[in-house]
Image (cartoon, rainbow, N blue to C red):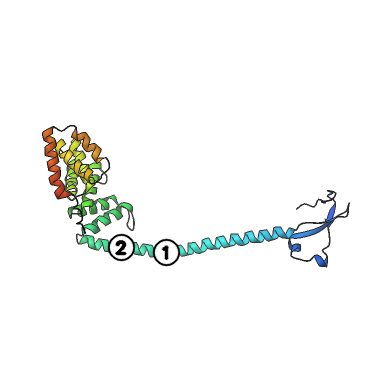
């Protein structure tokens, strides 16, 4: 708020009385001053503008606090409603799973793995995954094979991993076919067999599994001409059995 005279630049200025003709909206934000040196009368920003700005700032702050408080007050009912939905969902899934519904068993396994709606439990996750796999859920069979191969949530067991990969692969799961091909390629849990490795990798590649084609081709280089004929014939036979069927033309 400068009180320097605009004419002579003197600081010797004092507040001047507001004339009746000057009482306008401008008076809210400006105050008149008169220079004692050259008698020039001029206007400067009033203290009112700072008070007004302060009031606006306080109002905004109060509004923001009120909005946050109202949001927090509204959160518990929403959380309670969501919790009730999750609880009912778990109850429904458990009831179906206890009736050997493989889809419900697989979903319960995932819930226990993430802790969504239930206490997180690796043991429960694995138990429901096993049940789902035994009841024929192909994705559960593949995931159980991964758990056993990697020793996650279960004791590492290549032989059992191969068993579940085999079931899932025969169910058409492309990732299981790829995993099974890798096991035969490296002899992990099974005797190394380049013909079987090529066959399963070929099926996985046909379903677009990343890297399956390149790995298959490394196995191809190790096959004799007779083995290649055998492997490709087996891939055609198994493809007719284990690959998804194309939808009929309309």
- Residue 66: where, in percent of width, then height? 55, 63
Q: Residue furthest front?
A: 250
Q: CA distance from mark 2 to mark 1?
A: 17 Å
Quarter of the image with the C terminus in it: bottom left
x 69%, y 61%: residue: 52
Give the SS element for disc 2.
helix
**SS assignment at label 1:** helix
Whole-percent x, y for residue 184 in the image: 17, 38
**Residue at point 67% right, 59% down?**
53
Above or below, 237 against 25 in this view is above
Q: Residue at x 39, y 65 (%)?
A: 81
Q: Quadrant of residue 62?
A: bottom right
Q: Nearer the viewer, residue 247 or 80?
A: 247
- In this orientation, does residue 191 appear? no
Query: Which of disc 1 and disc 2 is earlier in sequence?
Result: 1
Q: Which residue is mark 2?
A: 89
Label 1 Cα crowd, 10 Å radius (few <14 / some 14-19 / many 20+): few
Residue 140, numbered circle: none
Given the current orientation, which residue lies at the most extreme bottom position?
A: 20
Taking the spot 52% from the left edge, 60% from the top edge, the residue there is 68
Give the number of marks. 2
- Answer with left or right where residue 78 lies relative to residue 26: left
**In the figure, is residue 151 to the left or right of 224?**
right
Q: Are marks 2 and 1 in contact (CB under 8 Å)?
A: no
Relative to 63, is 121 above or below?
A: above
The location of residue 76, given as percent across then percent down, is: 44, 63
Q: Which residue is mark 1?
A: 78
Dot 2: within a 10 Å radius of its alpha carbon, few (fewer than 14), some, or many (20 or more) residues? Answer: some
């Amino acid at each position: 708020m400068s009180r320097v005279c605009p004419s002579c630049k003197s600081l010797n200025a004092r507040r001047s009385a507001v004339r009746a003709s000057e009482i306008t909206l401008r008076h809210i934000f400006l105050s008149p001053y008169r220079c004692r040196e050259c008698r020039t009368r001029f206007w400067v920003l009033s203290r009112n503008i700072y008070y007004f700005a302060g009031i606006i700032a306080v109002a905004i702050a109060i509004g923001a606090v009120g909005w946050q408080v109202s949001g927090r007050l509204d959160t518990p009912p929403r959380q309670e409603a969501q919790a009730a939905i999750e609880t009912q969902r778990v109850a429904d899934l458990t009831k179906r799973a206890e009736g050997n519904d493989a889809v419900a068993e697989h979903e319960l396994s995932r819930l226990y793995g993430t802790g969504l709606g239930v206490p997180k439990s690796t043991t429960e996750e694995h138990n429901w995954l096993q049940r789902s796999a035994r009841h024929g859920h192909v994705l559960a069979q593949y995931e159980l094979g991964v758990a056993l191969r990697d020793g996650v949530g279960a004791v590492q067991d290549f032989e059992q991993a191969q068993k579940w990969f085999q079931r899932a692969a025969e169910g058409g799961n492309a990732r299981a076919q790829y995993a099974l091909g890798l096991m035969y390629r490296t002899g992990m849990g099974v005797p190394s067999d380049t013909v079987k490795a090529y066959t399963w990798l070929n099926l996985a590649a046909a379903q677009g599994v990343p890297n399956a084609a390149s790995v298959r081709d490394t196995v191809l280089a190790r096959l004799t001409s007779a083995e290649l004929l055998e492997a490709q014939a087996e891939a055609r036979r198994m493809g007719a059995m284990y690959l998804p069927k194309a939808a009929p033309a309309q």
